Image (spheres, rainbow, N blue to C red):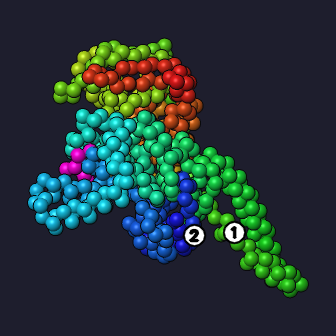
């Protein structure tokens, strides 16, 4: 169905990947994984035809529909929600709109008009044989949380997260034979991710998806494409199957590499000692030939690097952590929170969950006093030292100074080695620590914020979507760090593996019709919470 032949991509002197040869089969759902910067998105753009490779070519079987998840959330502002989904099948959309125009404006007694209408009817029948496009679109939108009463509203009325849901509906509606998805779970809440998983598991055709959501990859994918070592390797199974297999391969390669390095050192020592000795010259020449045959470069090191995250509190929390009473907040005329009361005890590690836009970030901002409540009180324990990770880190991480200088500004008495170690733990090493803070990518800014949290030594961490832009290795390391952390945590996240890794208490904001959300407070893990609901 889809084949990449000798695909290579380079930018100036940097080789992103080369000699990729792979045939992707029907009814396979591939998860495309790799370190940030390995070239995953570039490879997907090459497959879709959006980007030309430096070398090689892509073959797609004739008459197959290609679906690519759009990234421009503002491309359809003047369309209704229904039409924004319908335009995913451009041929059907154009035919329907032309029909509507002719019926409303043309002379229906004109033979030319009737011939055109007949041709348009044929297109509609070919693209929608059961004449069910309206019912299908309405069902998709309802499943994504858009009630029938709002489906004719314009895209411009939606928030960014809801616009992205429409883009997902748009690419799934035509049921393409080849489906290419780059980070489809970004900006989605847990119910929407569950809906997407269910739909993708029923997809009949070839699918390639880039995601940093481990649970999503395990649930949806039956093959993994691992972009590493400047090429692509295929593994059968889901992400966990790949992890087991790749770990074994990596250990074998490391052992082989160490063996060759030791052999290389011994040969070099022999040559150095005896090359000038006439009686040993022949043996030295023989050793040199052996040395020349040693291909250590073939055992390349992985581009993956695991961060080492460790949160260590400067002091333990006493008997009181946090208590808030009757918190209420409105934006304009919309009531977001009403009379929210919570008591958080020392040792609580909370996952704050709920649909997008329900007020999770608003609640966190009120708790850390970044936003003022309309009414109610927030009382922190006397021994609490906060560490806050805001949703939009770009507002906090900016400037011309170096990474080292930016961190040092928060505590000028801090030992320079501690600052550099904190940066090194988040994979900023050597010269990278001296580059300008405003030159960082989104993922790098998130790693910088984690470096700052590690240095601060707070005993109560408040985290709002900390996994955005992080790769799988960083998310796994963050989950382990939060689990081992001796202090308190309250974290907003839609990454289920992260939630499962650390949370011992779940607080869910549940939407209610015509009222503020209901709060469910469950003491236990996320898995136990899901079991209690079922």
Give x and y (percent) for residue 174.
38, 53
Give x and y (percent) for residue 18.
54, 71
Indicate yes or no whether the magenta region holds residue 406. no
Is residue 167 visible in the rendered image? The answer is no
Q: Secondary structure at mark 1?
A: helix
Q: Residue at x 54, y 73 (%)?
A: 5
Q: Is residue 153 left or right of residue 456?
A: left
Q: Nearer the viewer, residue 427 or 146?
A: 146
Q: Is residue 113 left or right of residue 427?
A: left
Q: Nearer the viewer, residue 491 or 146?
A: 146
Is residue 226 visible in the rendered image? The answer is yes
Which numbered disc flags the more N-terminal residue, 1 or 2? 2
Q: Nearer the viewer, residue 333 or 37?
A: 333
Of labels 1 and 2, the one closer to you:
2
Q: Nearer the viewer, residue 48 or 115?
A: 115
Q: Which residue is tagged 2? A: 21
Q: Which residue is tagged 1? A: 296
Question: Which residues fall within the magenta stretch?
Answer: 73-81
């Amino acid at each position: 169905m889809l084949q990449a032949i000798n695909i290579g991509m380079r930018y100036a002197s940097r080789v992103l990947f080369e000699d990729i040869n792979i045939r992707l089969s029907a009814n396979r759902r591939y998860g495309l994984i790799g370190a940030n910067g390995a070239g995953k998105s570039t490879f997907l753009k090459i497959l879709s035809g959006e980007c030309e490779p430096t070398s090689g070519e892509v073959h797609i079987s004739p008459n197959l529909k290609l679906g690519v998840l759009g990234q421009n959330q503002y491309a359809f502002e003047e369309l209704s929600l229904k039409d924004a989904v319908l335009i995913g099948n451009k041929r059907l959309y154009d035919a329907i709109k032309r029909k509507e125009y002719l019926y409303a404006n043309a002379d229906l007694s004109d033979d030319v008009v009737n011939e055109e209408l007949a041709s348009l009817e044929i297109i509609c029948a070919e693209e929608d044989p059961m004449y069910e496009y309206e019912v299908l679109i309405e069902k998709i939108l309802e499943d994504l949380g858009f009630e029938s009463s709002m489906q004719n509203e314009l895209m411009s009325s939606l928030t960014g997260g809801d616009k992205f849901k429409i883009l997902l509906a748009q690419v799934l509606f035509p049921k393409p034979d080849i489906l290419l998805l780059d980070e489809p779970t970004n900006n989605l809440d847990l119910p929407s991710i569950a809906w997407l998983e269910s739909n993708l598991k029923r997809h009949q055709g070839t699918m390639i998806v880039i995601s940093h959501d481990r649970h999503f990859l395990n649930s949806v994918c039956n093959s993994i494409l691992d972009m590493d070592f400047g090429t692509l390797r295929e593994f059968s199974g889901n992400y966990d199957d790949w992890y087991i297999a790749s770990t074994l391969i990596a250990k074998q390669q490391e052992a082989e590499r160490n063996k060759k390095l030791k052999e290389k050192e011994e040969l070099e020592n022999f040559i150095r000692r005896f090359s000038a000795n006439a009686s040993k010259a022949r043996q030295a020449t023989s050793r040199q030939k052996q040395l020349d045959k040693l291909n250590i470069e073939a055992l390349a090191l992985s581009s993956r690097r695991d961060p080492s995250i460790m949160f260590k509190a400067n002091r333990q929390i006493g008997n009181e952590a946090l208590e808030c009473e009757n918190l209420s907040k409105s934006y304009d005329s919309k009531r977001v929170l009403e009379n929210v009361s919570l008591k958080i005890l020392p040792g609580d590690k909370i996952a704050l969950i709920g649909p997008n836009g329900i007020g999770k970030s608003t609640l966190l901002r009120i708790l850390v006093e970044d936003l003022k409540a309309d009414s109610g009180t927030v009382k922190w324990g006397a021994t609490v030292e906060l560490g806050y990770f805001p949703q939009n880190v770009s507002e906090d991480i900016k400037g011309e100074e170096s990474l080292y200088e930016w961190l040092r500004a928060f505590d000028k008495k801090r030992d320079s080695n501690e600052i550099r170690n904190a940066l090194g733990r988040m994979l900023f090493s050597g010269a990278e620590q001296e580059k300008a803070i405003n030159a960082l990518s989104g993922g790098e800014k998130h790693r910088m914020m984690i470096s700052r949290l590690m240095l601060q030594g707070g005993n109560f961490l408040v985290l709002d979507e900390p996994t955005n832009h992080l790769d799988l290795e960083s998310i796994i390391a963050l989950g382990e760090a939060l689990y081992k952390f001796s202090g308190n945590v309250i974290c907003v996240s839609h990454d289920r593996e992260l939630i499962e890794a650390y949370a011992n208490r779940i607080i869910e904001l549940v939407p209610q019709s015509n009222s503020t959300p209901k709060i469910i407070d469950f003491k236990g893990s996320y898995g136990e919470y899901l079991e209690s609901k079922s």
